[in-house]
Amino acid sequence: MRPTTYETEHEMQDRAILVSLVTNEVKRASGDPEHSLQELVNLAETAGVEVLTSLTQNKETPDSKWFIGKGKVEEVRAAAEELGATTVIFDQELSGAQVRNLEEALDLKIIDRTQLILDIFAQRAKTREGIIQVELAQLSYLLPRLSGHGKNLSRLGGGIGTRGPGESKLETDRRHIRDRISDLKGQLEEVVRHRTLHRERRKKSGVIQVALVGYTNAGKSTLLRELTNADVYVENQLFATLDPTSRNLTLPSGKEIVLTDTVGFIQNLPTDLIAAFRATLEEVNEADLVLHVVDSSSPMRDEQMAVVDRILNELGASGKPHITVYNKIDLCVTDGSELLPASSGDAVAMNAYNAEDRGRLLDLVQSKVTGATRTFLFPAERGDLVALAHRSGDVIELEVNGEILRLTVALNKQDYEQHGHKLDEFVEQA
Ligand SMILES: Nc1nc2c(ncn2[C@@H]2O[C@H](COP(=O)(O)OP(=O)(O)OP(=O)(O)O)[C@@H](O)[C@H]2O)c(=O)[nH]1
Ligand SMILES: [Mg+2]
């Protein structure tokens, strides 16, 4: 029972008016409301909606019945009539009652930011895991909002086009939805178990895991593609990537690592969605090194970095070794009033399409995943120790000096912690 697709069910393009309510809370939480609204335009267009116009209202707190003020509702109605709108999309999350009241008053389809993001995810999900996760998030969003009947109910589940959890499911009652949710959770657990096993196998093989994370559209998939020739989807749109893709990559030293691309983050990411995508995001938790990819050219760069940091923190991945990749540096324009991000011991300023820049990134990755070099002196008969040294890092030099083997190894931190400490007593004394 996968979400219905845009192609099969969509008959007429949604024509939408966007509405943002700027409360004190909104100003505090997400900085410039203009940027948030621009992001909503991008999201709507990504979902295949034609954006007619946008309206904002400044108001201390949301109206409990209408979300926006009653007068603003009239303004939306007038604009909708004039422009021939079919849909109103709100930049914040609405309650079920607010959706119903607005639908009744306006006789238009009402969608909030959360539902819009869920719709995009439903369009994009391709793997079994992605599809389960999206449906789970959709139903968790829907369940507390199910209290009307008839047309309101079917509208509420409809979403953009008629994606969303699908018509047939809307006729079922809450109990059915709860059953479906627990069924999906079961399926997801199965997927998680599978993924965990796979990851543990990779881990046992001693391969270093590096995760690309960042705000949506920062250039994560571009980097994966440019670094590994992976055939991944790169698009100038939000949420191009939903499912994690992993590829092997060889560092300049010859060491192999696994690089994983992940779903992009966005401000006000619906909590249901984060919960549903936890399994996928676990990849980040398991990584030895996190590459935080930033669109340096975005006017919202700092806010976007803060969103990513906050979500990493929620995932419990904030203490990990990480590199900030200031990507798209070629698109940065500066009038001199503002400093461009610069490379440092923990950061690279780069253009993903520039080979030299990628070389600098790889050098930094290498320095992060490789520990110090150490030289060991083994008695010639201890071949087992040589094997152990191999497992603990990259052997740089091996000399045989009569009865003594002299071995220089670039230790890999994690592998060394696992078994390399047995070598300590053979370290060459300076
Ligand atoms: N000029 C320039 N464009 C870039 C650079 N890196 C990526 N892009 C472009 O930015 C857009 C988004 O790139 P993606 O790699 O799809 O971004 P992403 O982070 O994977 O995005 P999501 O999967 O949506 O989260 C594409 O149009 C890329 O061609 C860069 O360094 N310079
Ligand atoms: Mg991507």
Image: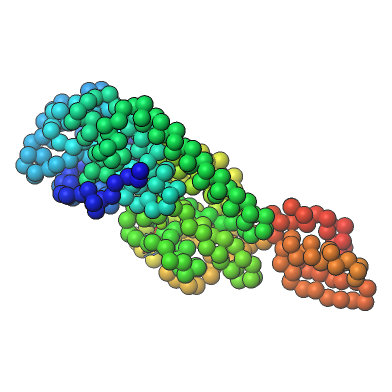
Left/right placement of residue 50 relative to residue 60 reads: left
Give the image's coloring scheme. Answer: rainbow
Residue 404 visible (yes or no): yes
Residue in the picture at 87% in, 57% down:
425
From this view, report whether residue 80 is shown above or below residue 258: above
- Place of residue 90 in the rendered image (x, y in percent of width and height, measured from the top left): 24, 37
Count of labels shown? 0
Where residue 378 sits, quadrant-wise, is bottom right
- Nearer to me, 89 or 62: 89
Residue in the picture at 84% in, 64% down:
384
From this view, report whether residue 73 is shown above or below residue 426: above
Image quarter where the N terminus lies is: top left
Where residue 205 sits, quadrant-wise, is bottom right
- Nearer to me, 320 or 156: 156
Residue in the picture at 74% in, 69% down:
395
Where residue 70 sits, quadrant-wise, is top left
Left/right placement of residue 360 relative to residue 112 reads: right
Residue in the picture at 35% in, 38% down:
138
- Place of residue 293 in the rendered image (x, y in percent of width and height, measured from the top left): 46, 56
Q: Residue furthest left?
A: 82
Residue 344 visible (yes or no): no
Q: Quadrant for ligand 1? A: bottom left
- Place of residue 328 in the rendered image (x, y in percent of width and height, measured from the top left): 40, 62
Image quarter where the C terminus lies is: bottom right
From this view, report whether residue 281 is shown above or below residue 221: above
- Nearer to me, 250 or 428: 250
- Place of residue 26 in the rendered image (x, y in percent of width and height, measured from the top left): 33, 34
- Nearer to me, 377 or 12: 12
